[in-house]
Amino acid sequence: MNQTNQMMMTGNLAAAWGARLAEADYIPAFPITPQTEIVEALAKWCESGAMAARFVTMDSEHSMMTAAGAAAATGARVFTATSSQGLLYAIEVLYSISGWRAPLVLVNVSRALAAPITLEPDHNDVLAARDSGFLQIHAETCQEVLDSILMAYRIAEDERVMLPVIVNLDGFYLSFTREPVILPAPEQVAQFLPPFRPAHLGFKASAPHALGVAVLGGTPYSYFRHQMHLAAMNALDVHSETAAEFERLFGRRYDVVEGYRLDDAEDVLVMSNAFASRGKVAVDAARAEGRRVGLLRLRMIRPWPADAIRDALRSRRAVAVLDQNLAPGQGGILFQEVAACLYGEALRPRTLCSFIGGLGGKNLSEGEFRTIFEQTAEAGVRETGIGPVLLYTEAEHREMKQLQMLAGELGS
Amino acid sequence: MWQRETFKKIKQIPREEHVLPGTSLCAGCGGLESLRLAAKVLGDDVVYVNAAGCFTMLATYPFTPFKGSWLYTTMASAPAGAQGVRDALDVLIAKGRLPRNENLKVVVLGGDGSTYDMALSSTSGAIYRGLDFYYFCYDNEAYGNTGMQLSAATPYGARTSTSPCSLQHPSASMQDKKDIFEIWRAHKPPYIATVAPRYPLDLEEKFARAVKFTGPKLFLALSACPTGWLYDPGETPEVAKLAVETGLWPLKEAINGAVIHTYIPKRKPVEDYLRLQGRFRHLFEPTRQDEAIRHIQERVDTYWKLVSG
């Protein structure tokens, strides 16, 4: 590891560095908060010649993703980024790109969805794309953002996969937070990430082909969709090979899930993305009070690493999933998926609890974590799960009453 | 006076076909005939970037009628797909990863539903960026692939499945057709033309002239539609001819914004054209709607009065 290349940078700049070090050929862009800093950095580098890529500002995210997918289908290495409403505006195209089996990397900087409109993060945006055929890697730190982009290209472009990847980071908390980031040396990146020379993609005069054609009936449709699923599942093995190679070259290890103080943990809190850092601090605090708790951070959301999750949660007393998203009328999205993959496990945790917190960037306080650990432990003893629990503190409630008063809803 | 330079006689039109028969498009499709003629100039070194519409059915797994390539995108973003393909080809050629002789022309295919409405943002963006591509709109004046619903290209007085004629609206569609030619022209692309399948020399000449221009080259093709306009498929040439001869479908081009009409019709009464088609039958039966017919005629007269200045 070359420590001299360590710099302070935001999550957004780390994402831009990922694209730069991956030597992306093409960057269609469209601004949206909190992602904009990524495309600003890339535009500057393309203009100065620091990057040999073509940068094009498109007319919408829908157009941006179409151009991105079409360029990848033509054989270029493509990078692009968006957030929130932009991701949803483009979502139709995500399904097309994965159907074309065109690998590219899309960074999503998570931001909660309207209405009401806001700027701060939760994961309803990126999870709206969970069934699109894009693979998903969710990062906790600025370093992980950069490293995950490099890994994402290698996984996406693997002949066994050939699917696009979303790398997710939390808006504001990571996008605008500076952390020390080690910049990998370009020669080492070249060793890790071979040039993109797809065997089954690319439009050229000598080898015409038709892509994205209509099919008649369910037989061919199902065949191609099944192929996508199998390819996505291949990404689990490809990820572990990629992670091993990444560790060999760069000395940093990333698995599909990350365990924190799990070894003797009775109860486990499941989280994802940047707020997991707070979860880890809360685990330390709870351990200091004598609670045997740990944290499981979900890093790869698609493909869903069911085996790794089962291995991490087997034989625990209670598991709490803290979802930073809300499916109204259902609850936490990741809770459903964790629960589903544990059902067939003979030594599954005795109790599952569901908590919803951090919506729209709402704080997750020490007190809330303490409550989560307490209620989860009680549920474990009772052997009855709880939730979805909508986390909201008394102080927040008072603040909201004030706002309602100002809005004229109360007290008149 | 506009003169054809490349295509003076019908024998000069190449015999070689680049859009092969056997597709599942309707018999008598005027859009397909226009594309067949256009492809005689475009050739095979083409990637067609398709928007959702009738032409989606051209490439149906495992078949394609093209000797060139095809990419199906979405209804709203085929021009953005063209941007991605064009840019990627340019980048790969510039970086030496694709030999120059592998280069392709990029051709968007869109129906009027996509062209006039849904894809306006992506089309406007592509023209604004000066994208070097062809845009081929097959205009059959309604959402055809879904069974003929009103589009912004539907002319006044046409009956569609979502603009039925009623006591309140006896003439069916109440709006005049959106002027997409002028919307395109306001963007100042180097080349725009209207074409009609019954005028093959005019059509071929325009595609041959467009080749010389780098940038957006836009074609609006009258796509006489037996299925939707309700006439016998064998009458497509006659319907297309009358659209032009009545003055309803002006044949014109705009080079760097300067409009020239490439054919000046003697202008038969619009009634000759309307009477051929079931979508206008309610203007004549059970009672003749003189006012609606007069409205259509007046629109044409006003247009040509402005042309002759």
Image (spheres, rainbow, N blue to C red):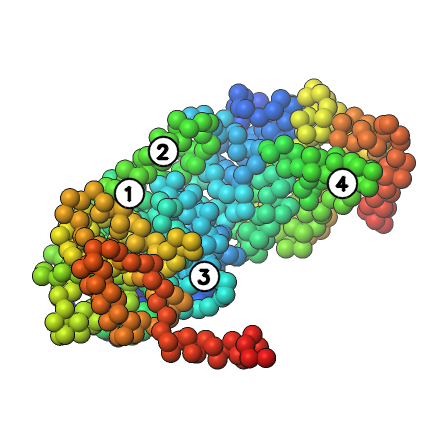
User: Residue A188, relative to residue B60: is it above or below?
Assistant: below
Q: Which residue position is annotated with label 1?
A: A232
For the C terminus of chain A, which image quadrant?
bottom right
Q: Is residue B259 visible?
A: yes
Question: Which sits earlier in the primary sequence, circle 3 or circle 1?
Answer: 3
Report how far apart the C-alphas of labels 1 and 2 lie in the structure: 12 Å
Quarter of the figure with residue A408: bottom right
Report how far apart the C-alphas of labels 4 and 2 lie in the structure: 42 Å
Report how far apart the C-alphas of labels 2 and 3 lie in the structure: 31 Å
User: Could you say where residue B22 lies in the image, as x and y percent from the top left?
Assistant: 53, 20
User: Could you say where residue A255 lies in the image, as x and y percent from the top left?
Assistant: 18, 55
Residue A224, numbered circle: 2
- Looking at the rendered structure, the secondary structure element under dot 3 is loop
Residue B173, numbered circle: 4
Q: Chain of mark 4?
A: B
User: Could you say where residue A117 lies in the image, as x and y percent from the top left?
Assistant: 49, 66
Q: Nearer the viewer, mark 3 or mark 4?
A: 3
Question: Which sits earlier in the primary sequence, circle 1 or circle 2?
Answer: 2
Question: Which sits earlier in the primary sequence, circle 2 or circle 3?
Answer: 3
- Looking at the rendered structure, the secondary structure element under dot 4 is loop
Report how far apart the C-alphas of labels 3 and 4 lie in the structure: 39 Å
Same subunit under labels 2 and 3? yes
Same subunit under labels 4 and 2? no
User: Tags 2 and 3 in contact by the CB under 8 Å rule?
Assistant: no
The residue under label 3 is which amino acid type? Leu
User: Residue B39, relative to residue A123: is it above or below?
Assistant: above
Q: Nearer the viewer, mark 3 or mark 1?
A: 3
Q: Which residue is depicted at the point 37% across and 76% down?
A: A394
Q: Chain of mark 3?
A: A
Q: Give whichever of B25, A201 is nearer the camera.
A: B25
Q: Chain of mark 2?
A: A
Q: Give whichever of A3, A343 is nearer the camera.
A: A343
